[in-house]
Image: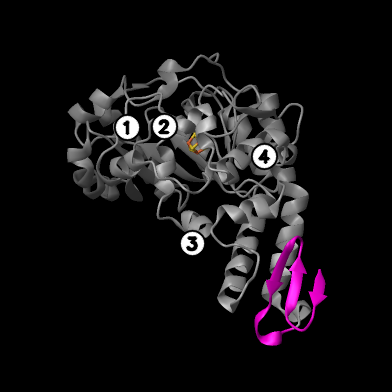
Amino acid sequence: MLVDGANRIRLGRAKRIHPGGIAPEKCTFLKYCISAQQDLSKNQGSFFDMVSFRKIKYTVLDNFSAVRKIARFGKRMQKELRSPRLVSIELTNACNADCIMCSRKYMKRKVRHMPLRLAEHVIDECKKAKVRGINLFWMGESLMHPHLDDILQYAKRVIPNIPIGLNTNGSLLTDERATIILNSTIGGISVSVDGCTKETYEAIRKNLSYDQVRNNVENFIHKRNSMGMKTPSVGAYFIQMEENAMEAKLFEEHWSAIADGAKTVAHWNWGGTQKNRAVGDHRKRASAQTFNFPCMNLWKELVISNDGTVSMCCVDYDITEEIGNIETSSIMQIWRGPALQRIRKLHMEKKYKEIGMCAACNRFALQMNSSWEHMWVES
Ligand code: SF4
């Protein structure tokens, strides 16, 4: 850093004017800027590439609030980039359901369970990378894994303090599996329930029984409570689509009484490979296609498939954009590696249409009006 006169400093290639004549070394905000720049330059490529994407131009900072914004931005980016916020582990891509909105039916990848040895290796990697959360789910029904108990017990021993979540369709949440889960460190279970009547649910979640899922959830919560436990919490989720939108309100009322919470979420089109079933605001936002910020998923989540291949994003169900393999690289090598960097850079340059799955993805629209979007585009 160079100090030029009383107020002007140079930060990398940019010239800035620091307001108020405060010595830059004594300014916490500027220290953040500088350390963020150094960290990002070292680990993530050019900080200036990133910030130029936002509309803040770093030639001259002529007011204190601009400095503050950069400081916040740098601090946030440092946190985001340190390690994945979430690692999704595909215990299996087998499933006992055939849901109308799921891309499994188009998936060309071999159907298989993650070997126990690989699952343990991934857990070790999560420990080393200090990931902030794990989701035991991707393209299949995790409760079908034959070594679920072994995997959960290993996680309990090795990463007792990393929060673990599990997504399930709930149909296999038997008493036996409930015991396995209640004996693990899983902190939250998300059960997908896309209807509030038997007819609607079973037309969407084909091969499953609405009554069975509801009974399983009720029994699980009863068992948990009778053991004096408060976790895992059980949330019911409802993907809003043309086929069930009329039951969304009823679902929230009904299932918030059964589970610990009930939430409706927007449908997404699996990178445009699926019919767009979204409704309401999400459909409007997605069809507007006015994305002027990079997709948050690339800075948030790492998705490890059942054979160790790592996907750029959970939408990329056939792993068209492979960013590494956990058998040969560590989580941090992949997180900071050239394959993911290339995709992030394309997003920062607003060239996401050059990436097959991103070009027609409408999941992106879920991030509009979020703090992530504001961080990038606010000036
Ligand atoms: S735009 Fe869609 S496919 Fe691309 S990274 Fe984001 S969520 Fe994934």
- The residues bearing labels 4 and 2 have C-alpha atoms spaced at a distance of 39 Å
Q: Amino acid at mark 3?
A: Glu
Disc 1 to disc 3: CB gap under 8 Å = no
Residues packed near mark 1 inside 10 Å, few (<14), some (14 to 19) or many (20 plus) = many
Q: Amino acid at mark 4?
A: Gln
Residue that badge 1 annotates: 213
Disc 1 to disc 2: CB gap under 8 Å = yes
In the image, the residue with mark 1 has its CB under 8 Å from the nearest atom of ligand 1: no
- The residues bearing labels 1 and 2 have C-alpha atoms spaced at a distance of 8 Å
In this image, 289 relative to 338: left or right? left
The quadrant holding residue 271 is top left
Marked residue nearer the N-terminal end (3 or 2): 2
* Front position among marks 4 and 3: 3
- The residues bearing labels 4 and 1 have C-alpha atoms spaced at a distance of 41 Å
Residue that badge 2 annotates: 173
Residue that badge 3 annotates: 378
Q: Which residues are magenta?
A: 1-22
- x%, y% of residue 174? 41, 30
SS assignment at label 3: loop
Q: Height in image: 366 above or below 101? A: below
